[in-house]
């Protein structure tokens, strides 16, 4: 079920989905974007922008090597080319567990990356902020949020 | 030449109107079928009587899970139609925070293991999560193929492919723990069906 879709008519440093209905099991955020310059992107929940509350592990292929590492709040990195990013935010309305989200970012000119991430908070997710740490999302970038029943 | 309109004068007196030229056929529909959410620990979780869903082309499982295993390398593992024999093959790509490794195994007793958090080894409230696709599981002319992606912060994530060396149509899916552990309360497995035909 498509909950909301944002298509940028001008560049923006972030997009926000607010008042997310709680009647779903999972959320899926699908992003198709370019950026106005090299940057990192972060997903924040419930306006919690403390980077230390977000942790993860990634593995990626760069076209010449495959590697894995621990990651902080960043969920995607771009040098300005087209990115397809899908994020599964699992059991987002549960209050008995930290919010776990798994993602895949495809940047054909640069890298493909999979991540398993965690927001160290048991609160139900009511808003999602997707933001650049510098520069901005370019015009015509789209961000679609879906709810999945469980 | 296509039909542009129908009216009573054409001799057809009872017909249904549709807004789409697909005439009400549901294509590419993704439906929630079942969810098991554990209120107490369990060594396995099972979806049974799957034949009732055989009008779906593909199935998907979405899970959030944790075990009581007090060591690294907890996982969810799948079996089909109750087959615990060595009839499964897997390929994995695993990232553990420092390296990426690829592995393969044949004659396994489970298909598709994915890492999840476990026991006192991880912070309380940390669960693993994943999404698994079962492709054409009701076919009786090909082996059942599955693919999955899952993991948990900050230890591991994995892409996995599994094969059940049996052409039987799928009737049940079991999620088991093969390390003498159990899934804890709060674990959730949800089953979905995807229709790609009328």
Image (cartoon, coloured by chain):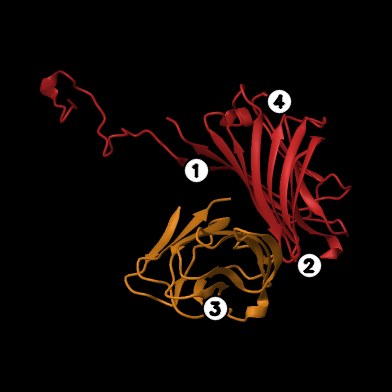
CA–CA distance in space, label 4 to label 1? 26 Å
Circle 4 or circle 2, nearest the eye: 4
Q: Nearer the viewer, mark 4 or mark 1?
A: 4
When asked about the image quadrant of residue A69, the answer is: bottom right
For mark 4, name the chain: B
In the picture of the structure, the residue carrying the numbered disc 2 is B124
- Say what secondary structure mark 4 lies in: loop
Give the label on residue B106, or none.
none
Residue tagged by mark 1? B30
Task: Label 3: state its secondary structure.
Answer: loop
Q: Residue at x 68, y 68 (%)?
A: A56
Q: Position of residue B198 (x, y in %)?
A: 42, 30
Chain A shade: orange
Q: Which residue is mark 4?
A: B166
Name above or below for residue B171 compared with residue A101. Answer: above
- Badge 2 marks a residue whose secondary structure is loop
Q: Secondary structure at mark 1?
A: strand
- Choose between A98 and B87: the one closer to the eye: B87
Question: Could you tell me how far apart the alpha carbons at marks 2 and 1 are, in whole angstroms?
Answer: 33 Å
Mark 4 in CB contact with mark 1 (< 8 angstroms): no
Within-10-Å neighbours for mark 2: few <14, some 14–19, many 20+: some
User: What label does residue A47 carry, if any?
Assistant: 3
Q: Is residue A101 visible?
A: yes
Whether the residues at callouts 4 and 2 have beta carbons within 8 Å, the answer is no
N-terminal label among 4 and 1: 1
Task: Tell me the distance, in whole angstroms, between the alpha carbons under discs 4 and 2.
Answer: 39 Å
Q: Nearer the viewer, mark 4 or mark 3?
A: 4
Q: Mark 1 belongs to which subunit?
A: B
Q: Colour of chain B?
A: red
How packed mark 3 is, by other alpha carbons closer than 10 Å (few <14, some 14-19, many 20 or more), is some
């Amino acid at each position: 079920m498509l909950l909301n879709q944002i298509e940028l008519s001008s560049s923006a440093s972030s997009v926000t989905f607010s008042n997310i209905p709680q009647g779903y099991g999972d959320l899926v955020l699908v992003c198709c974007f370019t950026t106005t310059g090299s940057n990192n992107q972060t997903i924040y929940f419930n306006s919690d922008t403390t980077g230390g509350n977000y942790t993860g592990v990634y593995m990626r292929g760069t076209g010449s090597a495959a590697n894995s590492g621990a990651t902080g709040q960043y969920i995607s990195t771009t040098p300005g080319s087209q990115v397809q990013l899908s994020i599964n935010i699992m059991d987002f309305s549960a209050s008995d567990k930290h919010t776990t989200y798994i993602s895949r970012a495809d940047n054909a000119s640069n890298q493909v990356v999979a991540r398993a991430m965690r927001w160290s908070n048991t609160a139900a997710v009511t808003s999602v902020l997707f933001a650049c740490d510098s520069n901005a999302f370019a015009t015509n970038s789209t961000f679609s949020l879906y709810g999945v029943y469980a | 030449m296509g039909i542009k309109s129908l009216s009573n004068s054409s001799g057809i007196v009872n017909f249904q109107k549709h807004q789409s030229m697909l005439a009400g056929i549901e294509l590419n529909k993704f439906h929630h079928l079942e969810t098991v959410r554990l209120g107490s620990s369990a060594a396995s979780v099972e979806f049974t009587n799957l034949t009732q869903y055989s009008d779906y082309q593909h199935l998907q499982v979405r899970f959030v899970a944790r075990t009581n295993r007090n060591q690294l390398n907890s996982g969810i593992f799948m079996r089909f139609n109750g087959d615990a024999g060595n009839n499964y093959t897997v390929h994995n790509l695993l990232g553990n925070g420092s390296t990426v490794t690829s592995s393969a195994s044949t004659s396994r007793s489970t298909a598709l293991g994915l890492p999840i958090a476990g026991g006192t080894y991880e912070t309380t409230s940390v669960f693993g999560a994943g999404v698994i696709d079962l492709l054409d599981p009701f076919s009786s002319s090909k082996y059942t193929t599955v693919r999955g992606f899952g993991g948990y912060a900050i230890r591991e994530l994995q892409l996995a492919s599994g094969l059940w060396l049996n052409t039987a149509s799928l009737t049940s899916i079991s999620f088991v723990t093969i390390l003498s552990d159990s899934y804890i309360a709060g674990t959730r497995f949800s089953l979905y069906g995807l229709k790609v035909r009328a």
